[in-house]
């Protein structure tokens, strides 16, 4: 180790232990309306953001503009050939707070189809990267490269009135969403299919066209992608991808810069990257325990081993949810209907039977239940999309619908630049000392002698 790194370790590691102690003894001490644990622990449960598009209940799960996922699977328009909702309709609902008609959905689809042509320099920017660059890195760079087209940047430079910010933001958002499937499919074909790209089919809906450009033209895969792109779209405002998009947007960064930030957050293994990690974890388990069907006892042993090695069990736990994620259930229902005998899908279901008890026994994991990422990979593998490093890009294309609808609202409502107050550990210690002194000090007589 170089001496700077050594000095850092000598300071930081004892300080981390010191802070752990501090939190044990004073975590509940109030700092204004919140406590010290919340300030150190990722601001969980602090009500400090306003997001119009969706609201998350710890037990019930997500509601998009007031509707649960089962309700949306009933109410949002779908094609005759498919029971799953069209994500174009979900975007309409998130943006306008109204259930769309089929005609409304067609209108959104037409607008996106007209704007779907990606400028050549975007592909060139992606092509400059080594082919084995992680797909999320390529995706983020592709989004950034599209920023040259931003209407918001142009309008701002021309001196737009702040009351009108939402207008060029809306234009950017519609163009960005329209182009994302093409960019994502380009990355997929470049990374895994020797760069043999597939031209879009404008007769298909947004999801089916995406599936087509990826190279998967099975009707059942179209259906799954419609469901996938609908349920991953939004999860209120505090999750990393939504919050990062909102935070960067609060500096009046345009939709491309803001959404790329959100995608960089989604690429973290505790957030969206968990969908690739789930499949990686299951495949490693299969390799280790023999490639046959895995018994529940074997899975149990593997979960315990994962925990004992200080790793997380991917696809389980959540910062807000305290029950099985309804997005997991929606995918389980889909799998029960379309591929109940699939081996990997059955392993996912067996993990679901044993993991919550083991995770619960640790006594520290607040939510031992599966989240959305626990199921998606097994269905993607079922349809032949086995390159799991790509899965988070699919999540990202969907997440655009929610966070970008919110970005238009942020500008329309004049939401301000985000700038929470931060303090140092030294400040916190002084604060605790002052507070403790106040509560412990003996009463001093104020009577004049
Ligand atoms: N496996 C092992 N340990 C877990 C765990 C899991 N699945 N979930 C939580 N824990 C641990 C935490 O790491 C933490 O440990 P320390 O006290 O040692 O730091 C402790 O349990 C308490 O954590 P928590 O309050 O229950 O959970 P957080 O709100 O801090 O974190 C999440 C939430 C999702 C990051 C966490 O549950 C996790 O790491 N899960 C696995 C990764 C995953 O599936 N992420 C995807 C979430 C959905 C999404 O964003 O797409």
Image (spheres, rainbow, N blue to C red):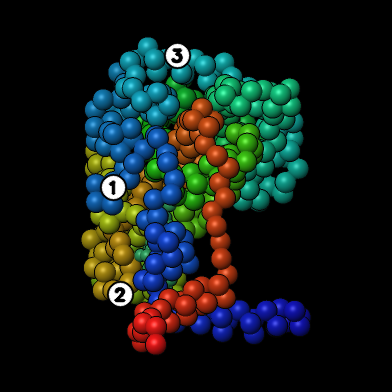
Q: Residue furthest top?
A: 103
Screen quadrant of the C terminus: bottom left
Q: To which residue does mark 2 refer?
A: 362
Q: To which residue does mark 3 refer?
A: 107
Q: How many marks?
A: 3
Where is ligand 1, by quadrant? bottom left
Q: Is residue 16 above or below residue 403?
A: below
Helix, strand, or loop for circle 1? strand
Q: Is residue 167 above or below residue 429?
A: above
Lower sequence index among marks 3 and 1: 1
Q: CA distance from mark 3 to mark 1?
A: 32 Å
The residue nearer to you, when weighing 77 against 421, is: 421
Helix, strand, or loop for circle 2? loop
Q: To which residue does mark 1 refer?
A: 57
Label 2 beta carbon within 8 A of ligand 1: yes
Q: CA distance from mark 2 to mark 1?
A: 24 Å
Residue at 53% across / 32% down in the picture? Answer: 414
- The location of residue 434, given as percent across then percent down, is 47, 77
Residue at 67% across / 38% down in the picture? Answer: 144
Q: Is residue 404 left or right of residue 65?
A: right
Lower sequence index among marks 2 and 1: 1
């Amino acid at each position: 180790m170089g001496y700077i790194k050594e000095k850092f370790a000598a300071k930081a590691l004892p300080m981390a232990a010191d802070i752990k102690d501090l939190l044990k003894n004073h975590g509940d001490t109030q700092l204004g309306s919140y406590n010290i644990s919340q300030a150190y622990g990722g601001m969980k449960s602090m009500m400090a953001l306003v997001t119009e598009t969706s609201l998350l209940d710890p037990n019930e799960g997500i509601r998009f503009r007031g509707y649960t996922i089962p309700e949306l699977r009933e109410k949002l328009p779908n094609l005759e050939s498919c029971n799953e909702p069209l994500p174009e309709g979900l975007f309409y609902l998130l943006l306008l707070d109204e259930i769309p008609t089929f005609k409304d959905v067609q209108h959104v689809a037409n607008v996106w189809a007209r704007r779907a042509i990606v400028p050549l320099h975007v592909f060139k920017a992606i092509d400059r990267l080594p082919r084995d660059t992680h797909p999320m890195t390529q995706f983020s760079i592709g989004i950034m490269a599209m920023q040259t087209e931003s209407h918001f940047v142009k309008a701002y430079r021309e001196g737009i009135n702040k009351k009108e910010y939402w207008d060029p933001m809306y234009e950017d958002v519609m163009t960005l969403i329209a182009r994302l499937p093409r960019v994502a499919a380009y990355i997929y074909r470049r990374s895994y299919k020797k760069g043999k790209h597939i031209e879009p089919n404008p007769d298909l809906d947004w999801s089916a066209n995406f599936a087509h450009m990826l190279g998967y033209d099975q009707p059942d895969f179209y259906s799954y992608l419609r469901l996938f792109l609908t349920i991953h779209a939004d999860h209120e405002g505090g999750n990393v991808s939504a919050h990062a998009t909102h935070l960067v947007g609060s500096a009046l960064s345009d939709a491309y810069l803001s959404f790329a930030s959100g995608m960089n957050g989604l690429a973290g293994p505790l957030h969206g990257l968990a969908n690739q990690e789930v499949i990686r974890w299951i495949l490693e388990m299969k390799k280790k325990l023999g490639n046959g069907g895995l018994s529940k006892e074997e899975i149990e042993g593997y979960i315990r081993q994962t925990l004992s090695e200080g790793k997380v069990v991917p696809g389980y736990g959540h910062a807000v949810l305290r029950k099985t994620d309804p997005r997991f259930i929606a995918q389980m229902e889909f799998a029960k209907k379309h591929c109940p005998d699939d081996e990997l899908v059955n392993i996912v279901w067996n993990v679901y039977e044993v993991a919550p008890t083991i995770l619960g026994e640790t006594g520290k994991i607040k939510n031992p239940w599966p989240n959305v990422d626990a199921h998606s990979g097994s269905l993607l593998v079922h349809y032949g999309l086995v390159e799991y490093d790509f899965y988070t890009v699919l999540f990202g294309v969907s997440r655009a619908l929610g966070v970008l609808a919110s970005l238009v609202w942020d500008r329309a409502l004049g939401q301000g630049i985000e700038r929470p107050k931060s303090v140092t550990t030294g400040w916190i210690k002084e604060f605790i000392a002052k507070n403790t002194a106040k509560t412990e000090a003996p009463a001093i007589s104020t009577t004049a002698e």
